[in-house]
Structures are given as structure tokens and as C-alpha cells.
Amino acid sequence: MTQLRRALPAAVLLTLLAGCSTSSTSPASTPIEPTHDDGASAVSTDHGKVQAFMLRGNVVLGHESNSIQPCGSTQQYWLNTPIADRKALAQVTRPGYEPMYGEFIGFLEPAPEEGFAAAYDGRFNVKQINLISSEMLSGCQRPPHATRAFGNEPGWVVELDGDKANLLRPGQQRQQQTITSKNIIAGKQHYQGQDFSLTLTKGQCNDTMSDSLFGWQAKLNWQGNNYQGCATLGATDITLSWSGRYQGTSLINDTPVLTTTVTLNPDHSATTRYDYPSGEPSLNETGFWQQGSDNTVQVVMTKHQGRRLISERVFTLEGNQITVKEETVNGQTFNLGGDGLSLKKQ
């Protein structure tokens, strides 16, 4: 069995273990089921539908390097930006591959086998720019901001905090109103209060006072006064409830034969480790993860023992564990048996 595991991908070994039982190795906490963010929606990829998510980090743009390094991470993803946004991005890009701070909504795919992007940990396909700035270099040192709109001449900022809208203007006291209704559709968000309304419309925006590009245009009416400016959605990645370590042990005749540990990191990188009770060397795979539907998570491994191998599992949340019944490896699908592979969150 273990000799086969050295030569075959994970799916093949788990197929051989089909019908064997799987047990957890320690108590688990229950993952929180994710909720949908205002700016995120399902997108179709070569590996099925996934939920677009917010990714924050340090960005480098240039001919040979278009990359994002997520905040607090050493991972680097190739940044695939929409063609329609590239002219505007070029206008705020610093020369000489100097880093900028960026926030983007999008999804991950494996890096291609050739070209500049091949050397990266994956390819992040941008669905929408939230913001990119050559001035906010300390953006990763700050916590994710809430949804906010802002403008100049005169200067103003509205920040949404739960069911409250807060207006700040230079030299004036903060004003607050309760949000009584909101309407969110693709490309547009509208918030209403007793004496204010705020409309955000998807579109490139520059506040004229900085080398920054924003992804939303804003119109505010506050107590009869009209303002126009830019906006950004809240920068929190609401899919991070999936992050953590999941583990399960496969048994044959009540004897442990293989322990599988899947780790989903906050930067959306992922690892899979296979350990053997016999003491043989562990096997390791690396890749990425992203939410599928409300109760599924897609885990894609792109390297097995450091060599390129594209394998995909879509785990389903069931109580306090995640379960998968098949795996696709380099385009070929393997059944993982009647019970599949079940892992508990540690």
C-alpha cells in the first residue's frame, strides 16, 4: 500500500482504501458557515464554480511581474487584471517595479506551465478592483476597513458600520444616521436613511487628490446636500471561516494506515500532508483553496513533492467535518469510495 502511494497521486491511494473507515484524531471546533459578501458572487472556472473573494496585499505591476503578495504572507500570486482596467492601472503604477497596496475581488486558478506567471504560487484572476494605491504602503499594517465613500472639494467621508452611516467632514463633528433600507444588485448598492441616501455604482474612480484607483463611484445626499466621489467595499475576506487544519485517519480492519492533514491558510494557500504510522517519510502537496457554495470548499493542489500535479477536491461541510467523495487529478476523476474522505477541523 505505501509503496503504491510513493508512485501514485493521493486520489489513487484513497481509491485503494475505498470502503475503509476514517476517524478523527482529536476534538474539533465546528466551522462557521460563510455568508455572502456584498461584492462577491459565484464565478465559473475551469475547475467549477467558486465564490469570488477579497484579497488584500502588496502589489507589483510591470511587464514581467504582475503580482500580489497577500498581507501577512510570503505567498505570491500572479495578478491577472481585466483588460478594460489596464490603462487606468498604468496611470497609477509606480516605475521600477515599486510595490503598491491593493485590494481586489477575484478567484484563484493554477499558474500556467509556461510564461512569466509559471513561477508563481497561483494565478489570481481579478473580477473587480476595490482599490490600488501607491500612497497607502502601510495598508497591510491596518485592519480591513468597512465599506466607505469619500470625496474632495469639500472633503467628506461616509463609513458604514453595521446599520449606521457616519459622516465625517473637516472641522465638523461626526454625524450619524441609521440605515433603514438597502438594495444591493450586481454593480450597484443603495443605502437609505431618514435624511440621507448613498448610491455606489461599479466603475473606475480617482479622487483627483492621490495616485489611487478605486472600483466604485459614489453619490451621497445628506440632509439635502449633494456630494460625489469614490468608494470602496469592506475589505474583509468573509470566506476565512474555512481556514484552519483538518485531519482524518484511514483505517483497515481498525488499524490506522494513513493520516491525511489538510491545512487551509488565511492567504488562501493550502497544504496536504500524508503521514504513515509505520514511520515512512511523509508526502506533501501544496496549492490553494477557495469557497465553492455556502457549504463547500474547493481545495486544489498544484505540486506533489515539489513537482507539478493538478488535483482538485471539493469538500462539503457536514456538521463538524468536511467530506469529499471524488478527486480529479490532471483531468482524470477518481472515486474515493462509498464514505469518501472525511476530515475534522482541529
Image (tube, rainbow, N blue to C red):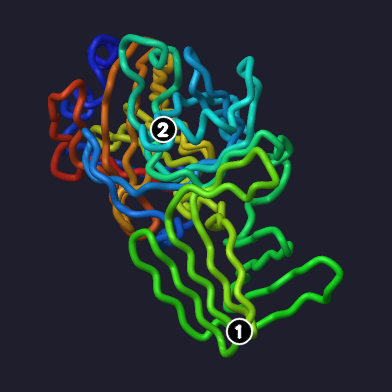
Judged from the image, the secondary structure of the residue bearing numbered disc 1 is strand
* Label of residue 46 in the image: none
* Label of residue 178 in the image: 1
The foreground one among 35 and 87 is 87
Could you say where residue 72 lies in the image, as x and y percent from the top left? 64, 35
Q: Residue at x 37, y 47 (%)?
A: 52
Q: Which amino acid, mark 2?
A: Thr
Position of residue 51 in the picture relative to residue 337 (left or right): right
Q: Residue at x 65, y 21 (%)?
A: 98
Residue 289 visible in the snapshot:
yes
Position of residue 309 in the picture relative to residue 337 (left or right): right
Residue 346 visible in the snapshot:
no
Identify residue for label 2: 81
Could you say where residue 29 lies in the image, as x and y percent from the top left? 50, 56
The foreground one among 121 and 276 is 121
Could you say where residue 77 lies in the image, as x and y percent from the top left? 47, 26
Separation of residues labelled 1 and 2 (CA atoms): 36 Å
